[in-house]
Structures are given as structure tokens and as C-alpha cells.
Image (cartoon, grey):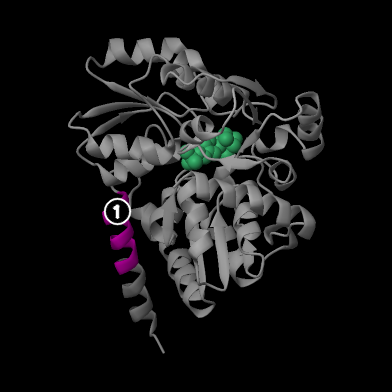
Amino acid sequence: MLTPLDKEAQLTQEAHRLYGLLKSVSKTKAAKWTFEDCLAAAPYVLAINRFKKEQNAVILAHSYTTPDLVYGVADFRGDSYELALKARSSTADIIVFAGVWFMAETAKIINPGKKVVIPAGRAGCTLADSMTGEDVKKLREKHPGVPALCYINSSADVKAVCDSCVTSGNVFDIAQKIPGDELIFVPDMLMAQNIDAELKRRGTPKKIISSGGSCCVHDKYRPEIVDKLRAEHPGIKVLAHPECPIEVCQKCDYVGSTKGMAAYVAASSDKTFGMLTEFGLVNRLEAEHPDKTFIWPYGVCSYMKKNSLINTLEALIDPRPDQVVTVDENIAAQAKKAIEKMFELAK
Ligand code: 13P
Ligand code: SF4
């Protein structure tokens, strides 16, 4: 039995551990994480890590969630592809997916026998919510015989009617591998333009037929932002996610997934990077490269930010119905084929 003094010592120790990881990380555009912030987070972090062990749960956190989750309680942090792979190989009884609904849904489809919970509940994504399986079926009827790829940022019923899924980390390679000179790509209309440009650049062009929407975070960047970053920070390297408009991507030094951007920064001897992506990735880079500077104009995903330490604890102890992921069995069986096809094509 811990005495009140022991408990206080444990909290202080946890706060020091967290502060050691987060002291170079921005909490807002104007302020860094403080020791007091870490002290406030410590009781939740300790409780979550204790319940996690007791219940044989694993916590997967997308890099766009907040740093207290990413560094305090997550067993694995990463991009959509890495987290889907971790979900697939997990031996835990419960998967807690700190991300958005389509990510947790994908984990459930790969692991139908496991309990999958999402702290944020039904946190959407403007891409995943832009199209239904019926919309894709109609598109496919208009273009018979044309293979269809869906971005992983899509609902299970969209995945169920596509030939393969892709993530931002493998989209260009998989699009290139698919035979034929036409390709349906849903539901990211901006990424479709980037695929078109990249396949032309590689000398393997295809006609890309697309429908759907865009990411409400990445579609806000404009080419002038790249010019401004370069004018204000000579020598800066500008990195963008392929959900950004093509006019932006074409001006950048690197375009890739959140994992790809992190790898670019890690391998670069440059010191200043302009980040045209969500704040959470900037936070990860600040934590992992305190010697480098990251200039971030704007871009916050309110869906990702619905995950918190409090609702992670809730999802572990006594999840609300909307935190428990369920997928219709028939749709899940069909969607699984598209996800597994991606794993095969991404090799
Ligand atoms: P990544 O797979 O690159 O992490 O992208 C996920 C996402 O939702 C980007 O907006
Ligand atoms: Fe969806 Fe955009 Fe949020 Fe990613 S950043 S989860 S694409 S809304």
C-alpha cells in the first residue's frame, strides 16, 4: 500500500519523465510544454499505464494526436500504415486506437476477434466522410474494368468495393504497380492529382479517375505559403503531405506520409524545416530533434485532437458504446481483402 508521500513521489517522478520528453515540444504556437503541464498529466498517465498492463491492452497513437498520449501512454506511434501493421501483429486482447474512426475501424477489420476501442469515439475525417460504398459502386459502373484504389482514409464500405487500399506512404508505388492505363482513386481528389503528377514524373502515366473530397487540414495550404517560408527562412526545406494541393506539393522539397517526412528530417543535415502538415507531427519532430527548428504556419485536425488522456482512461476502464468499434461482418470481410491486398502490394 502506497503512503500519500510515496504517491506524491511517484507523480513527481512521472512528471519529470514526461517533462524530459516534452520540454522542447510546443503546446500551442506560442508556448512549450511546462513541468506543471506534465505534473497535471502524470496521474492520468500512471493510471492508463497501470490499466493497460492489467487488461493486456496495447495503445496505438497516430502522430497527429497530442504529445501526452504519444509519449505518455502509447506503445506504438506512427503513420496509418505503421499502425495498421502494428494492429495486425498485436497479441494484446484490447487495442486502444488513439486516432480517428477509419483507423480504429481498420484495426478492427484486421482483428475481428479483438476488442478495439477509440478514445475519441466516432471521430470523423473529412476524407473518410466524403463518400459511401454506393458512390464508389456507381463510379465503378461508369468505368467498367478499371481497377479501383481507395485511400485508407475511407469508410469500411468504401474499402469493401475497392481492389486495394493504399496509404500516403505507399500510394505512388502501388498506383504504379497496378496494371492498365486507367485507375480509379477515391476519396481524396487532391491526392489523385498528386498521383497523376508523380506517375507522369516516373514516366508511367495513367488516367486517374477520382471522386470524393479533401482533407480539411491539408487543403488549406497555398503555394504562397511556400514562397513566404523560403523568403523568411533562407535555406529552409519545405515538407508537405500528399493530401495538399498539387500547386503546393510541386514547390516543396519533399512530399510524403507523416513517416516519410519524419524520415526526411532524420536523414537531413539541414536545420530548419517548414512543415505543411498537422501540428502533432511538428510536436513529434520537436521532441525527437530538439536541435532542429520547425516552422509550422497552421493546420490542426480537430478530429484527432478529440483524443485525450481522460477519454483514453475512460475507453480502457468502461468504454462508452461509441468508443467500441464494430463493423458489419460482411462489409468487414470484403474490406479486409482490400487492406490485405495493400500489405501484399506494399512489400
Ligand atoms: P499518414 O498515414 O501519412 O500519417 O496520414 C494520415 C492522415 O490522416 C493524414 O492527414
Ligand atoms: Fe482526416 Fe485530414 Fe484529419 Fe487526416 S488530418 S484525419 S485526412 S481530416
Q: Label 1 neighbourhood size at 10 Å, few (<14), some (14-19), many (20+)?
A: some
Main SS type for the magenta part? helix
Instruction: Answer yes or no: is residue 224 visible.
Output: yes
Quadrant of the image for the N terminus?
bottom left
Residue 185: say if magenta.
no
Using residue 160 as the reference point, say whether residue 307 is left or right of it. Answer: left
Q: Position of residue 259 (x, y in %)?
A: 39, 41
**Residue at image coords 51%, 49%:** 344
- Judging depth in this view, the residue of 203 and 157 nearest the camera is 203
Q: Position of residue 196 (x, y in %)?
A: 53, 19
Q: Position of residue 236 (x, y in %)?
A: 26, 20
Tell me where residue 209 sits by quadrant: top right
Q: Which residue is mark 1?
A: 21
Q: Which residues are magenta?
A: 13-22
Q: Position of residue 159 (x, y in %)?
A: 68, 44
Q: Is residue 263 above or below residue 224?
A: below
- Judging depth in this view, the residue of 167 and 228 nearest the camera is 167
**Residue at image coords 72%, 46%:** 160
Tell me where residue 283 sits by quadrant: top left
Element class at badge 1: helix
**Residue at image coords 63%, 37%:** 150
Picture quadrant of ligand 2: top right
Instruction: Answer yes or no: is residue 27 visible.
Output: no
- Judging depth in this view, the residue of 74 and 48 nearest the camera is 74
**Residue at image coords 48%, 12%:** 247
